[in-house]
Image (tube, helix red, strand yellow):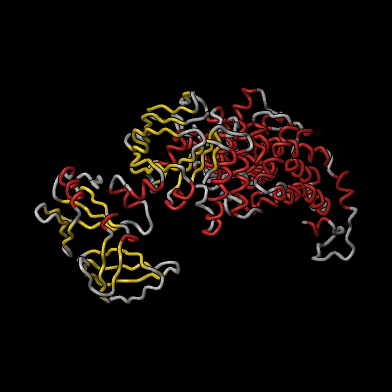
Amino acid sequence: MVEVILEKLTKVFGKNTVAVDNVNLHIKDKEFLVLLGPSGCGKTTTLRCIAGLETPTSGSIYIGDRLVNDVSEKDRDVAMVFQTFALWPHMKVKDNITFPLKMHKVPKEEIKKKLNETAKLLEMSHLLDRVPGQLSGGEAQRVALGRAIIRDPKVFLLDEPLANLDAKLRVHMRVEIRKLQEKLGVTTVCVTHDQVEAMAMADRIAVMHQGKIGQLGTASDLYDQPQDLFVAGFIGSPPMNFIDCTYEEEKKALISEAFSLEIPKNLAIEIKEHATSSEVILGVRPQDIALHEKQTPNSISTEVYAMEPLGSEAIVDLRLGDIIIKAVAPPTYRTRPGDTTWIIFNMDRIHVLDKKTEKAIV
Amino acid sequence: MFIVAISDWGPITWLPLNPRWENFVYAWSYMQYPPLWRALLNSVIVSFSRTLLVLSASSLTAYALAMYKFRGSRVVFWVVLSAMFMGSFRLIPVVPGVITLIPSVMLMFWFGWLDTYWALIIPGFVNAYSVFLLRQYMITVPDEVLDAARLYGCSEFGLFWRIMLPLCKPALAAIGLINFVWSWNDFLWPLIIISDQNKFTMQLALMGLWDIHGSLSQLNLVSACTVYATLPLIIFSIITSKHLIKGFTGLTYTKR
């Protein structure tokens, strides 16, 4: 059983650049955990700390039962796939893949056997005598994966493994990586800034922001119940719309410049109990906005600003007071900039956040 | 030079009607102090040893300067840079500048290396220019390439030997050739430091031809000897040509 536990992990570069800030994380055995966040949020640094390529400023890292803070990278029994694949261009593919075994002085016969097994598993037997310069992006990716899995590592670390692939291959490889991880049953930590990738591959996702873990949960947890403004805005495509509102207790309504929205009783109670002030942010996913050509009860009038027909759906940008919000419409929906359209929010799926603390209230 | 080498005695023409290829045979007996083979051998020994030493010392120094941040690493780098730009103040001269010439000779005297191969080889083996070029090349190698090797069990020396050096082949080829040519063409330093004719390098031996015969009557044979003196440079350039252009034009690592 190999769990990875990070306790109060902190990494400071220089005097005061805090890359990882007091991170606590418990990665379960055989779990596929994704560290998700924008550039510079500390996710790669966290991964490099687990690999042993960075020394934590403070905190502890456990792999299995072993505290590995003082264990060198090569003795941690972890394997890593780098964003650029980091293949050695002067070595043939087979030498790249078997390098970890040679370094650990595994007998030649054993190396040969493992090489054949790995090549078969990743369907790359025909690539073994090539050099990295002769490989396509997808092939180089498979070689990097082969090099990582050949030594049966305890933990598998993936640093933006799909970032250097084209869009079509990315969709294919994310399935392949997930299947491979399930087949090998290795505890895996993957870093990505792409939320679609994260949601497609992960058992659980840890959203990182400014060196801290904002929220940890399954893809649906993060999508349905974001705990703060950052996670709410980061997860989901197109991103959630945020509208500044004032909560009026007497009317039990959210008031903005463009509308007055009556809210259900239970929602009103939650706001009353948990909000620090009457200033709140209404969060609505574009998928939770229904568009109507004619005015209906409780509908809000908006002006169409732009439209992006994407084939499977259409994204409509709407001017609501001073702000632009996005709504997802069926592919057959037709409208033109300047048209007036009426929208209704799905009240079961709206989010209300405290403007001051940026934490979710509902 | 080649045309003169295959010319007959007498006036030099652009295209000799009866090329005398046998001049290249006569050249072997024409040069006697030292014999041509000995002068060539001396030059080969000195230039190859110096080039190998320069490559090994420079690559190790450049690796340390490019990869490790240690106390004083910037100072060391600036010393290397200044040694490169201020020829007169070279710590250990490649081709001794005029100012450092006498101290360098004194140094050789104290070491007891006057009139030895050591004096021809050792003073040139630390070379600021080579260190700088290699360091600049090495810092373009992405960290990930080395991190991967480190993670998969490579030792620190293994990183240098198995990963960095093979990746630096173009830079090593370019620097190797530059140093080989410098060393091969070096005249002033051997002239001062060597008096035993058997240790004369090719450049000194060629000068000897003029001293002995004192006229241009044997210019074709002198030229034939000079052709022999340039051949190793041409051969060395051909051997390293695969990497040379890359080494000289773009001193950066390319991923694939």
Quarter of the image for residue A253 reads: bottom left
Write down the quadrant of residue B220 in the picture. bottom right
Q: Height in image: A157 above or below A342?
A: above
For residue A66, side relative to residue B213 (left or right): left
Vertical comparison of A342 with A353: above or below: below
Nearest the eye: B100 or B168: B168
Residue A258 visible in image: yes
Q: Quadrant of the N terminus of chain B?
A: bottom right
Residue B51 at x, y percent in the picture: 67, 39
> Horizontal placement of B119 versus B40: left or right?
left
> So how many labels did they put on this image?
0
| Residue A277 image point, x, y percent | 14, 47
Q: Quadrant of residue B175?
A: top right
Give whichever of B238, A315 is nearer the camera. A315
Residue A77 or residue A129, whichever sits in front: A77
**Residue A346 position in % (x across, y down):** 28, 59
Tell me where residue A148 appears, x and y as whole percent: 59, 39
Residue B185 visible in the current orientation: no
| Left or right: B101 in relation to A311 | right
Residue found at x 65% / y 46%: A122
